[in-house]
Image (cartoon, grey):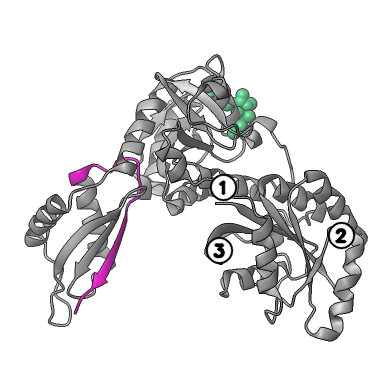
Amino acid sequence: RPVVAVVGRPNVGKSSLVNRILGRREAVVEDVPGVTRDRVAYDAEWSGRRFTVVDTGGWEVDASGIHLRVAEQAEVAVELADAVLFVVDATVGATDTDEQVVRLLRRSGKPVVLVANKVDDQRQEADAAALWSLGLGQPWPVSALHGRGSGDVLDALLDVLPEKTSVAGAYARGGPRRVALLGRPNVGKSSLLNRLAGSERVVVDAVAGTTRDPVDELVELGGKVWRFVDTAGIRRRVHQTRGADFYASLRTQTALEKAEVAVVLIDVSEPIAEQDIRVVQQVVDSGRALVIGYNKWDLLDEERRHYLEREIERELVQIQWAPRVNLSASTGRNVARLVPALETALASWDRRVPTGRLNAFLGEVVAAHPHPVRGGKQPRILFATQAGTRPPTFVVFASGFIEHGYRRFLERRIREEFGFEGTPIEISVRVRE
Ligand code: GDP
């Protein structure tokens, strides 16, 4: 899915515009300007096309409370996005900061749609027209707050938004499987990529069904070619001291868009951090297959190892299903084990359980452990089917509300029976009275 970044100075109305695009009040506009938000990317749809919107409004203050320069945000956003919505406050006009961003946008060569915001009524349209002076083409007058003009902006956006081949499409053509190498800064992504790619770099054009994409690397492992997506950020080692969190989170998001499976690296020489858990959560939310690489295993002593296992039990129980490889990118230990782990995870991601087998199994499970009786009634499981793969998605029809705990129980049993090692699975329950 193509990525659209919404860029502009603080308070020009970026989050309001994102809300308009999403058509709901989800991208909370905070009362405190520039409050850091966890989420940076949202799924959006307009005229039947789907894309990811990135609200850089969340980056205005980094974890240490330092205001990021607008141009810095824009730089990062532009690098990762396929198109940019550049928002200017028409009631203020173009400021020096805006001009600075314009230069950067021009250099990037990425398509830009200029949004003249806060044009709440027709009288103010002259303010918008003044923004032709920025040299970014037509300024689109908008009132993000009231919704005025936002449809036209989205139409203009779709006109310039590049098509992207879907992951499923790429795979159907028999290309190499797509891996995202993820993890917070300094866990060893770059070291691992170097070790994997090292001598085995593949000539891109020699591989059938692959298009050239300079940010991806093709690597031969275990006799097969794998595509490591979006490696530019790993290679270039963008060492931003400020805004590094946002950069990392955004890179994770865009890499996941392109990937089928993620390897999340965790540095075992340090306590598991909130940021590690967040990356893992992003993978699960994206529905991609998952392998965990515990890196820097060479640095582990007895004591740290003891604590590590306890941390894993405490912090990462929700992904007990993910294959685990204890490795060292520096020494090369166990790096080869990533291949079978990736294969297992992808096979699970692709797996489809025949409806007959699924229902026969669930019939037994439910007979042995029926749903608890609630309000004198016992909700029954009527029928289940696997509606999709990548990730496996199940629809369960029931005669009444199924409690959360019972859903978890069903998920656990389905996993035990059908072996979905390495993939998140989704179970949705539909109630038929
Ligand atoms: P990235 O930010 O995730 O790409 O991390 P780097 O690959 O740049 O690694 C960060 C630091 O950790 C560097 O100093 C590496 O040499 C070191 N490092 C990476 N992997 C290992 C490992 O397996 N063992 C040890 N001891 N150090 C490692």
Residue located farthest toward the top when viewing the structure as drawn: 199
Local SS, label 1 = loop
User: Mark 2 highlights which residue?
Assistant: 98
Q: Please indicate whether residue 371 sits to the left or right of residue 288 in the image.
A: left
Q: Nearer the viewer, mark 1 or mark 2?
A: 1
Give the extent of the magenta segment.
417-433
Disc on res. 5: none
Classify the position of the C terminus by image quarter: bottom left
Callout 3 crowding tier (Cα within 10 Å): few <14, some 14–19, many ≥20: some
Disc 3 residue type (three-letter) = Ala
Measure how far apart labels 3 and 1 are at the Cα level.
Answer: 15 Å
Residue sitting at x 47%, y 36%: 178
Residue 265 in view (yes/no): no
Q: Is there a contact, CB below 8 Å, between mark 2 and mark 3? A: no
Give the quadrant of residue 158: bottom right
Label placed on residue 44: 3
- Labels 2 and 3: the sequence-earlier one: 3
Residue 164 is marked as 1
